[in-house]
Amino acid sequence: MIPENVTGPVAHHAEGPVWWPGWGGLRWVDGDAGDLLALRADGVTRQHIDDEYLAFARPRANGGVVAVGARTLYLADAADGEFRAVASLLDDPRVRMNDGCCDPRGRLLTGSMAYDAAPDAGIVLRLDADLAVTTVLPRTTISNGIGFAPDGRRAYYVDTLAHRIDVFDVVEGELRGRRVFARIPEEQGLPDGLTVAADGSVWVALWGGSAVRGYDSAGVRIATVELPVPQVTACTFGDDDLGTLYITTSAQGMPDDHGSVAGSLFSVRPGVRGIPVLPFAG
């Protein structure tokens, strides 16, 4: 599968792509810039949200947007509305939020990491609609992709430096029975963001691996999408049929004169379809 470069290198550290018809299609973040990007018919637009880092954004069930900054939760009441800070998620300046999603009950899951990737310095939090906070996973290192199976009975999770994707059973809304779903040898790249398709397959971006890999529901590799840049950060299914895999890439840590297309958004049609994004109930 040969992906298409959709945008060129419009971001420094592109992450967290999400497709939602209610906000007009695809949005993603330029993390280090603290900006939310949107793909429009006439190009890419930016909205600045956080002065330190923007981890990801998701639609709200009421039509607005929730965004997670370095340590702050933001809400907007409309798809293109102004954001306001509503909650502090962390109080340690050495740690920031990194990735997350919503669960089938509409609760927001958000994980963190230390800026220096110190072991066990991160955490995964769950926010209810009323913004009540629960710790789901303590002692993470680089908390990255989180996604749910189409039937909501399994959850997939990446703590990047563990070099694997883990899977949980979802029992009455709680994550139980953590175990290995797929291992990724270090020399093949580090697992980063992920998304789940309607057939139950799991698609994961490989930081340093120049690729996105697809695994079937048993954890067997079924596909590889090769990218022309090394740092592949995340992916999501989009378009009206949810049949296009959108892939974000990063130039983070690369020299100013790297001369590559890192930071571009790519797309490919892998032959499977995604599932609609789960919105935040708050």
Image (tube, grey):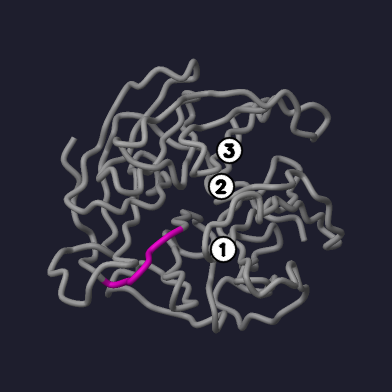
- Tell which of 109 and 117 is nearer to you: 117
Q: Which circle marks residue 277 in the picture? A: 2
In the picture provided, is 278 more to the left or to the right than 187? right
Q: Residue 56, percent across and down? A: 54, 62
Marks 2, 3: nearer the viewer: 3
N-terminal of the pair, mark 2 or mark 3, is: 3
Q: Categorize mark 1 by other alpha carbons within 10 Å: few (<14), some (14-19), many (20+).
A: many
Q: Which residue is mark 1?
A: 57
Q: Which structural element holds mark 2?
A: loop
Q: Which residue is mark 3?
A: 157
User: Which quadrant of the view contains residue 244?
Assistant: top left
Q: Residue 12, percent across and down? A: 33, 71
In the picture provided, is 153 more to the left or to the right than 219? right
Marks 1, 3: nearer the viewer: 3
Marks 2, 1: nearer the viewer: 1
Taking the spot 49% from the left edge, 19% from the top edge, the residue there is 217
Q: Which structural element holds mark 3?
A: strand
Magenta part, dominant SS: loop
Q: Which amino acid is tagged 3?
A: Tyr
Q: Is residue 14 magenta?
A: yes
Q: Which amino acid is tagged 1?
A: Ala
